[in-house]
Amino acid sequence: MDCLDWVTEAARRSGVRLLPLSPEIAGDLSDRILAATARHFGATLVTRDRSLLGYAERGHLRAIEG
């Protein structure tokens, strides 16, 4: 089984939904793309990035430290 198939199957079995990143959703900065993508899909972002976690604490998106 190749890597992509393994990740896809592991996500399916665990109920995790992998979402595409799209630069059209937000500007060109990676944090903005991640935050905007999570907000667009109503997803919870799993991150260790302090600025994204702070943004979530202020109520702008859902995020957990992971």
Image (cartoon, rainbow, N blue to C red):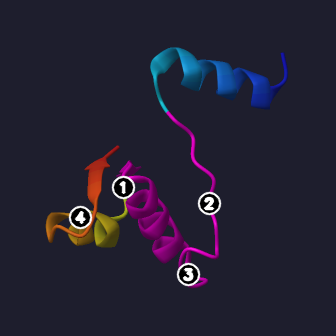
Label 1, label 2: how many angstroms apart (C-alpha)? Answer: 18 Å
- The answer to the question of whether label 2 and label 4 lie on touching residues, with beta carbons closer than 8 A, is no
Element at label 1: loop
Residue 50 lies, in percent from the top left, at: 30, 67
- The residue lying at 57 percent from left, 47 percent from top is 19
Name the residue: 45% across, 69% down: 36
Picture quarter with the N terminus:
top right
Disc 1 vs disc 2: Cβ atoms closer than 8 Å? no
Q: Earlier in the sequence, mark 1 or mark 3?
A: 3
Above/below status of 60 relative to 11: below
**Badge 1 is on which residue?**
48
Instruction: Give whichever of discs 1 and 2 has the lower sequence position.
Output: 2
In the image, taking residue 45 as reference, residue 20 lies left or right, namely: right
Magenta stretch encompasses residue 40: yes
Q: Mark 3 points at which residue?
A: 29
The percent position of residue 60, horizontal first and vertical second, equals: 24, 70
The residue carrying mark 2 is 21
Q: Is residue 49 magenta?
A: no
Three-letter code, disc 2: Leu
Task: State if disc 3 and disc 1 touch (CB < 8 Å).
Answer: no
Between the C-alphas of marks 1 and 3, the distance is 17 Å
The span from disc 1 to disc 4 (Cα, nearest Å) is 12 Å
Q: Is residue 22 left or right of residue 15?
A: right
Quadrant location of the C terminus in the rendered image: top left
Q: Earlier in the sequence, mark 1 or mark 4?
A: 1
